[in-house]
Image: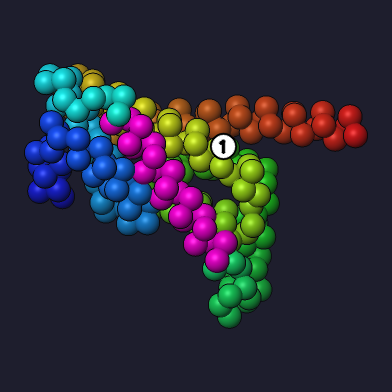
Amino acid sequence: MDGISDFVLGLAGSPWVYLVVLAFAAVDAFFPPIPSESAIVALAAFSASSGQPDLVLLGLAAVGGALIGDHAAYGVGRWLGTDRFAILRRPAAVELIERAEAELDKRAASLILTARFIPVGRVAVNVTAGATRFRYHRFAPLAVMAATAWATYCVLVGLLAGSWVKDQPLLGAAGAIVFALLAGIVIDKLLARHRKRAANAS
């Protein structure tokens, strides 16, 4: 993985770097071992001292790639569905799927925002959202918020390289997950209140 990061850093001054970051972030939604986070953090740290690559474009490329990957995972989930394979029609699997569907309906923001910071978690949540037919008009804005929060976090960690976050990367990652979880809880409560008011009004 260090070789991949070195390859990306070698492109720091090239306009191709943004396309590479976009591709890494998109593939990362399916294949977590691709080090999109570490590549973005390294590029942001490099930019802090050299001015290249442009941080705004770097962030936009990361957001775009994350959205492409997350939407692709959602699409795969919709294609697979919950009854395409016999194993998914077993009582235990049906119960698990129903529970996942209920959790997504109750606290989608918490799950989608938090999962974006967990490599395997984002794959599982986005595929599950598609498979359970979680409504796209709810998924899309949450995916945008999650991708934006994730990309912003990666860029900020890079800018803070050399500080305590660099020496304690696990603590920094844990802080991002907690932040995403709290933001998701707040959003879920606001959405629940909005739906309740809409139901009362009708």
Above or below, 58 relative to 77: above
The answer to which of 14 and 48 lies nearer the viewer is: 14
Residue found 26% across the figure and 51% down from its top? 34
Seen in the image, is 122 located left or right of residue 194?
left
Instruction: Give the quadrant of residue 67.
Output: top left
The answer to which of 171 and 126 lies nearer the viewer is: 126
Residue found 33% across the figure and 36% down from its top? 61
Residue 184: give x, y in percent of width and height: 55, 33
Residue found 85% across the figure and 35% down from its top? 199
The answer to which of 87 and 142 lies nearer the viewer is: 142
Looking at the image, the residue that sits furthest to the bottom is 86
Residue 193: give x, y in percent of width and height: 74, 28
Seen in the image, is 75 located left or right of residue 188?
left
Residue 76: give x, y in percent of width and height: 49, 62
Q: What element carries label 1?
A: helix
Above or below, 130 relative to 80: above
Near mark 1 (Cα within 10 A), the count class, few <14, some 14-19 or many ≥20, is: few
Residue found 35% across the figure and 32% down from its top? 60
Q: What residue type is labelled 1?
A: Pro
Q: Give the range drawn in magenta.
A: 58-79
Asked if residue 77 lies in the magenta stretch, the reply is: yes
Seen in the image, is 177 located left or right of residue 185?
left
Q: Pointer 1: what residue?
A: 141
Residue 92 seen in the current view: no
Residue 136: give x, y in percent of width and height: 62, 48
Magenta residues, dominant SS class: helix
Residue 108 seen in the current view: yes
